[in-house]
Image: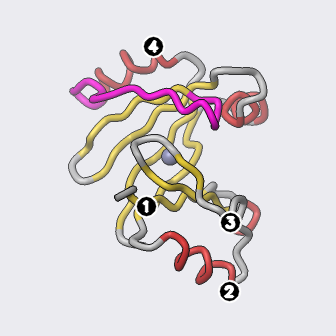
Amino acid sequence: MRKIEHIGIAVADLEKSNELFARLLGKSHFKTELVEGEGVETSFYQIGDTKVELLQATSPDSPIAKFIDRKSEGVHHIAFDVKDILAEVERLKAEGFEILNETPKLGADNKLVVFLHPRSTNGVLVELCQERG
Ligand code: ZN
């Protein structure tokens, strides 16, 4: 893993949170993106070499809606940039980590993504992401 690519934060109301984070970070988000497959609307903030991703559910059965029901708004996942996502999946499987989707899927921001189950990572939902060529 090369760096923290972004930190994902679950929010109930993206519009309100965009105002809040603009005040917090002193800058506006640089884009919003709907990821239909994940049932989320996202917005991104560039913070130096990494990003903050806000995620709002687009339907009640979205993973973000379930997360907010179970816990509350807050840090949802940490995403690590990887060079070769398939090799990284193999390495982590061999290390005993539980992979949620072994076949990378298309995430926000033109990335291939794989998630690790939080029960194998001390409660942290870990996302691997690889830039699509
Ligand atoms: Zn993410």
**Closer to the camera in the image, 53 or 35:** 35
Q: Residues within 10 Å of mark 3 (few under 14, many from 20)?
A: some
Q: Position of residue 52 (x, y in %)?
A: 38, 40
**Callout 4–callout 1 Cβ contact below 8 Å:** no
Marks 2 and 3, how far apart at CA:
13 Å
Q: Amino acid at mark 4?
A: Glu
Identify the mark nearer the N-term, 2 or 1: 2
* Discs 2, 3 touching: Cβ within 8 Å: no
> Is the residue at mark 3 in contact range of ligand 1, meaning its CB lies under 8 Å from it?
no
Residue at x 68% of width, y 79% of height: 93
Residue under numbered circle 3: 102
**Residue 133 belongs to the span the image colors magenta:** no
Asked whether residue 122 is in view, the answer is no
Using the numbered discs, state the Cα–Cα distance from disc 2 to disc 1 in whole angstroms: 20 Å
Q: Based on the displayed image, in which of its 4 quarters is residue 116 positioned?
A: bottom right
Neighbourhood count class around disc 2 (C-alpha, 10 Å): few under 14, some 14–19, many 20 upward = few
Chain part drawn in magenta? 25-40
First-in-chain label (2 vs 4): 4
Q: In the rendered image of this protein, does residue 39 appear above or below residue 87?
A: above
- Compared with residue 7, is residue 89 higher up or lower down, i.e. above or below? below
Q: Dot 1 corresponds to which residue?
A: 130
Looking at the rendered structure, the kind of residue marked 3 is Glu
Numbered disc 4: secondary structure: helix
Instruction: Name the N-terminal-most of marks 3 and 1.
Output: 3
Q: Dot 2 corresponds to which residue?
A: 94
Where residue 14 sits: x, y (%)?
49, 19
